[in-house]
Image: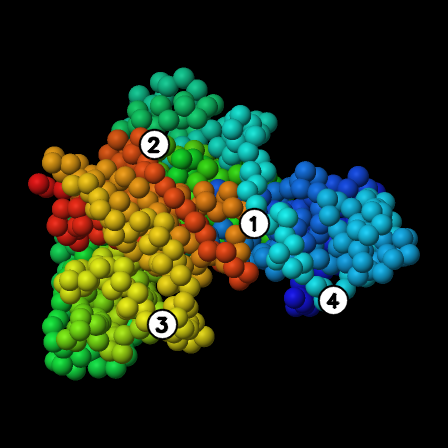
């Protein structure tokens, strides 16, 4: 297989004073303080030194998806490096890296070819030098364990011995990749590179940053969505030992500039600054605040859902194939159901935090963020800084799930550091983290199907109503977006199909949540398919496979097609893995769902037990995944397990309710998540193929909720059309 990169990302090879070999993306010169800085280096990604050590810059934020391990594995594989001599340096934000964000299951997708090409090009010049020294043909040589080897003679040369001469050879424009069957690193189980630091507590997260002269802060926000700052009585707060100051955060102080964020009011609030985080928390708890609630809607959950239901009759068409009305008239039967899903919070274990040192010459930031580009733009817009005046470090992140795509907490910190004239570390309480989130949108889904005499679906109508995350909080004067995509399954599989969307205005702040819109639509779609199967007295898995039809590429929209064959394969495999159809004890049932997301195909079977008291216990989960090439099997299994557990947790317990414009939940005691003792037995398998790797962080989550709901129906005969489930009334 040959690879040729675009000129913009042409790989360069340069000589350095230390005798190291550097491969980098030729974009722009790096500064003197770059992690691999040396003369004549252009934004380097790879370094090989004379001792044979290979160093890689990890450009993407590490939010727990394992990119700091997976990307070096790809590089080491193509290069032929010794895995025990590979190390990784986390890169700061640098526009030279491009696409330097985390989310959407894109890390491996975006870097697969780049890392392979980088490793293969360096390998090629090493082979050229070794061939000359050994007097052998390049075709007779290979790289392995940090050496160039001539297998027939057993002669070897370590990488370090070849660098001086190799650094004088231009990198080739095209290279041959290693054949998949020769992989020795990619596809294996490799522990995370920084596992030891994670386990023994040495890993430094954003919340652990300490700077000389630093002060500590927390922020109180108006509990009512879209509310402004108010007045406060600080008498008791000022008695707290360690308190330094209490400040109003108000964007009017900065010339009324709007920031790069979804909400124009997100900087409004009250900041408490102290000599420790705990002193700041304590003083904040002693403040008596009268908040400004002028102009807020003071919404309630019941009222929001009433508006969603009403909006089902006032929609815009997002996609229409054929004639849905004619399909309904001609049908042997028609079937309808309505599903509801709640607002969800992100609840990462590490709450929002940031450290900023704002000086006269610029701003240095330690930000656990998924979106450093938005942070840089916000700092430029708010303070009028030039890009070169901003330095953003990317510490390890203790969970994100989409919450850290937004940079409100980091902007708060920058404002405080500028006001205080010294470094500030801002930490949110868990309560603030939950009550001032950018929530997964709640929604109502009306599903309609028309069926022929054989029970086959001939017409499909999916109507979704909610307040969209694609609007800036859904306020008047801001453009509305849609929460249903034209390629929503089963688009392309049903001749007469209509997808509709009804938008509702709301103050509730909304944003990305793991698997984004698919986390909600999949529950409706795949619960509905299960209902149709039982309505037609069919086995749900057989019914789904018949719905897919034969293995083929199904055109959906533009250049996007659905590979029915890959979906069929994961379903057939999970049938075997789960012993689908075998007898179960009384009170138990199995449920099934299969989805596609981020290019990956996932089929899941959930087995549940429902007691006479209605308590649900998830006994077992079986999952089969086709994500193309599995780079790190250990990390991949962890991603699948984590996605499934988060999906099950949300289905069982996850719900943010709103009362008088305020989120009612505040911590894990009332925003329940699965405990370790509730974790089911899990069986994960991957389809092996040589297709390019696709996303894995999000695709396992959407099937979990419908598979669980379908299992409960199989066990009890009760349909779950509204989440969360919690327990069954019996």
* Earlier sequence position, callout 2 versus callout 4: 4
* Earlier sequence position, callout 2 versus callout 1: 1
Question: Given this view, does label 3 or label 1 mark the residue nearer the observer?
Answer: 3
Q: Secondary structure at mark 1?
A: loop
Q: Residue 270 in the image: x percent, y percent?
A: 36, 36
Q: Residue 542 in the image: x percent, y percent?
A: 27, 62
Residue bearing the label numbered 4: 173
Question: Given this view, does label 2 or label 1 mark the residue nearer the observer?
Answer: 1
Is residue 525 something that shows in the picture? no
Q: Residue 354 in the image: x percent, y percent?
A: 48, 38
Going 27% across and 39% down the picture, which residue do you hit? 619
Label 1 Cα crowd, 10 Å radius (few <14 / some 14-19 / many 20+): some
User: Marks 3 and 1, how far apart in space?
Assistant: 30 Å
Going 59% across and 50% down the picture, which residue do you hit? 186
User: Marks 3 and 2, how far apart in space?
Assistant: 41 Å
Q: Is residue 494 above or below residue 468?
A: below
Q: Quadrant of residue 33?
A: top right
Q: Which disc number belongs to residue 187?
A: 1
Q: Are marks 1 and 4 in contact (CB under 8 Å)?
A: no
Q: Secondary structure at mark 2?
A: helix
Label 4 Cα crowd, 10 Å radius (few <14 / some 14-19 / many 20+): some
Residue found at the very far front of the displayed protein: 582
Residue bearing the label numbered 3: 550
* Nearer to us in this view, 606 or 237: 606
* Nearer to us in this view, 506 or 651: 651
Going 28% across and 51% down the picture, which residue do you hit? 580
* Nearer to us in this view, 309 or 411: 309
Answer left or right for 358 relative to 470: right
Answer left or right for 706 relative to 167: left
Q: Which disc number belongs to residue 676?
A: 2
Going 65% across and 57% down the picture, which residue do you hit? 116
């Amino acid at each position: 297989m040959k690879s040729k990169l675009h000129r913009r990302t042409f790989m360069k090879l340069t000589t350095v004073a230390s005798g190291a070999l550097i491969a980098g993306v030729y974009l722009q010169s790096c500064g003197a303080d770059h992690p691999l800085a040396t003369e004549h280096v252009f934004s380097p990604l790879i370094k090989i030194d004379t001792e044979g050590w290979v160093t890689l810059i990890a450009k993407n934020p590490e939010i727990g998806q394992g990119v700091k391990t997976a990307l070096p594995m790809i590089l080491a594989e193509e290069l032929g490096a010794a895995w025990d001599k590979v190390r990784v340096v986390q890169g700061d934000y640098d526009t030279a890296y491009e696409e330097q964000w985390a989310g959407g299951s894109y890390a491996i997708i975006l870097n697969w070819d780049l890392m392979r090409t980088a490793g293969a090009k360096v390998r090629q010049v090493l082979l050229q030098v070794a061939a000359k020294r050994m007097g052998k043909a390049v075709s007779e040589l290979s790289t392995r364990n940090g050496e160039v080897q001539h297998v027939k003679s057993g002669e070897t040369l370590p990488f370090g011995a070849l660098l001086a001469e190799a650094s004088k050879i231009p990198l080739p424009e095209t290279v041959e990749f290693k054949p998949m069957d020769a992989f020795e690193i990619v596809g294996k189980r490799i522990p995370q590179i920084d596992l030891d630091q994670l386990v023994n507590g040495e890993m430094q997260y954003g919340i652990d940053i300490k700077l000389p002269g630093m002060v500590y802060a927390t922020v109180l926000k108006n509990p009512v969505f879209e509310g402004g700052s108010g007045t406060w009585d600080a008498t008791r707060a000022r008695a707290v030992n360690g308190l330094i100051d209490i400040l109003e955060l108000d964007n009017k102080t900065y010339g009324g500039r709007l920031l790069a964020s979804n909400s124009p009011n997100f900087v409004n609030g009250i900041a408490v600054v102290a000599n420790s985080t705990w002193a700041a928390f304590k003083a904040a708890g002693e403040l008596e605040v009268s908040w400004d609630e002028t102009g807020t809607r003071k919404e309630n959950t019941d009222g929001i859902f009433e508006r969603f239901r009403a909006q089902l009759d006032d929609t815009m068409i997002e996609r229409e194939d054929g004639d849905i009305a004619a399909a309904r008239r001609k049908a042997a039967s028609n079937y309808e159901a309505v599903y509801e899903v709640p607002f969800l919070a992100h609840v990462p274990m590490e709450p929002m935090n940031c450290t900023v040192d704002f000086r006269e010459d610029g701003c240095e930031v330690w930000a656990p963020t998924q979106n450093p580009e938005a942070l840089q733009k916000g700092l430029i817009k708010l303070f009028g800084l030039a890009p070169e005046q901003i330095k953003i470090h990317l510490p390890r992140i203790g969970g994100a799930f989409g919450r850290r795509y937004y940079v409100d907490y980091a902007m708060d910190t920058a404002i405080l550091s500028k006001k205080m004239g010294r470094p500030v570390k801002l930490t949110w309480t868990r309560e603030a983290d939950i009550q001032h989130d950018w929530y997964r949108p709640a929604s109502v889904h009306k599903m309609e199907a028309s069926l022929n005499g054989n029970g086959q679906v001939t017409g499909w109508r999916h109507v979704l109503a909610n307040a969209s995350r694609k609007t800036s909080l859904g306020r008047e004067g801001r453009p509305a977006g849609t929460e249903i995509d034209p390629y929503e399954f089963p688009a392309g599989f049903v001749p007469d199909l209509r997808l509709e969307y009804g938008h509702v205005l709301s103050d509730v702040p909304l944003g990305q949540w793991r698997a984004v819109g698919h986390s909600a639509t999949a529950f409706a779609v795949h619960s509905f398919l299960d209902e149709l199967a039982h309505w037609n007295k069919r086995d749900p898995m057989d019914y789904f496979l018949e719905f897919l039809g034969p293995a083929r590429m199904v055109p959906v929209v533009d250049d996007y097609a659905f590979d029915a064959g890959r979906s069929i394969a994961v379903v057939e495999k999970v049938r075997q893995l789960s012993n689908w159809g075998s007898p179960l004890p009384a009170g138990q049932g199995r449920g099934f769902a299969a989805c596609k997301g981020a290019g990956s195909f996932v089929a899941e079977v959930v087995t549940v037990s429902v007691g006479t008291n209605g308590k649900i216990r998830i006994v077992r989960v079986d999952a089969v995944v086709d994500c193309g090439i599995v780079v790190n099997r250990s990390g991949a299994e962890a991603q699948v397990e984590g996605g499934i557990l988060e999906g099950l947790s949300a289905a069982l317990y996850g719900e943010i309710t709103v009362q008088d414009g305020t989120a009612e939940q505040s911590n894990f005691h009332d925003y329940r998540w699965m405990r370790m003792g509730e974790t089911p037995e899990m069986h994960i398998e991957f389809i092996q193929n040589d297709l390019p790797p696709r996303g894995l962080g999000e695709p396992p989550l959407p099937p979990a909720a419908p598979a669980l709901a379908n299992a409960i129906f199989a066990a009890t005969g009760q349909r779950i059309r509204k989440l969360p489930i919690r327990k069954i009334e019996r």
